[in-house]
């Protein structure tokens, strides 16, 4: 595993944990979308078309639409920024797909650019949690019941 890939993975996991514990419903939905996309990309990475990572492109397309849907349905700014960065990832996929003679150098550049953009998308989630904390909004986990409540005997 490349050092930047390890950094990306550790950063993502830390931000996901913080967003789940300190975020609201929008941030939790974002974490679920991110985790689903990460897991789906591992499964789909074997689907290729003449060297083009078609499976990953399809996962990123679904990820983009999920973030765009979240941005339209919720009132958090970070969802719009994350969807915009995800759209830039789709542009990178299109550029690689339309490259006439795809070689390993192009594939490496594509993967490196998508990793960099991916870090920006994850940082959007972190910025959303930070903004929530700075605004004094309570996290969802503060109101969650972690234990079963015993039924009242009357």
Image (cartoon, helix red, strand yellow):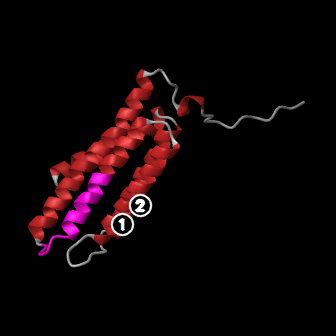
Q: Quadrant of the C terminus?
A: top right
- Check disc 2 and report its element: helix, strand or loop: helix
Q: Which residue is pictured at 29% across the width and 59% down the height?
A: 90
Identify the residue at horizontal 16%, vertical 50% (top origin): 3
- Residue 13 visible (yes or no): no
The stretch drawn in magenta includes residue 94:
yes
97 sits to left or right of 84: left
Q: Is residue 139 visible?
A: yes
- Callout 2: 10 Å neighbours few (<14), some, many (20+)? some
Disc 1 packing (10 Å; few <14; some 14–19; many ≥20): some
In which image quadrant can residue 123 be found?
top left
- In the picture provided, is 147 more to the left or to the right than 75? right
Q: Identify the mark at residue 62; answer none if there is no mark.
A: 2
**What span is colored magenta in the figure?**
87-102
Residue 151 in picture, x, y percent from top left:
80, 35
Q: Nearer the viewer, residue 5 or 48?
A: 48
- Mark on residue 58? 1
Q: List x then y, in percent, for residue 60.
A: 35, 60
Gap in Å between the C-alphas at discs 1 and 2?
Answer: 6 Å
Q: Nearer the viewer, residue 136 or 18?
A: 136
Locate residue 106, reporting x and y percent.
Answer: 12, 65
Give the numbered dot on residue 4. none
132 relative position to 55: left or right: right
Q: Position of residue 130 (x, y in %)?
A: 38, 29
Seen at 83% across and 32% down, the residue is 152
């Amino acid at each position: 595993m490349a050092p930047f890939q390890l950094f990306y993975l550790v950063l993502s996991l830390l931000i996901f944990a913080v967003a789940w514990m300190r975020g609201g419903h929008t941030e939790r939905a974002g974490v679920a979308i991110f985790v689903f996309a990460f897991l789906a990309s591992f499964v789909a990475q074997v689907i290729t078309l003449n060297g083009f990572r078609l499976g990953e492109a399809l996962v990123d397309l679904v990820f983009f639409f999920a973030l765009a849907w979240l941005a339209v349905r919720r009132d958090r700014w970070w969802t719009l920024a994350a969807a915009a960065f995800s759209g830039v990832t789709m542009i990178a996929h299109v550029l690689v797909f339309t490259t006439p003679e795809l070689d390993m150098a192009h594939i490496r550049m594509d993967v490196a650019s998508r990793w960099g953009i991916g870090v920006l998308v994850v940082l959007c989630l972190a910025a959303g949690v930070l903004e929530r904390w700075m605004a004094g909004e309570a996290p969802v986990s503060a109101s969650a019941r972690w234990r079963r409540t015993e039924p009242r005997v009357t």
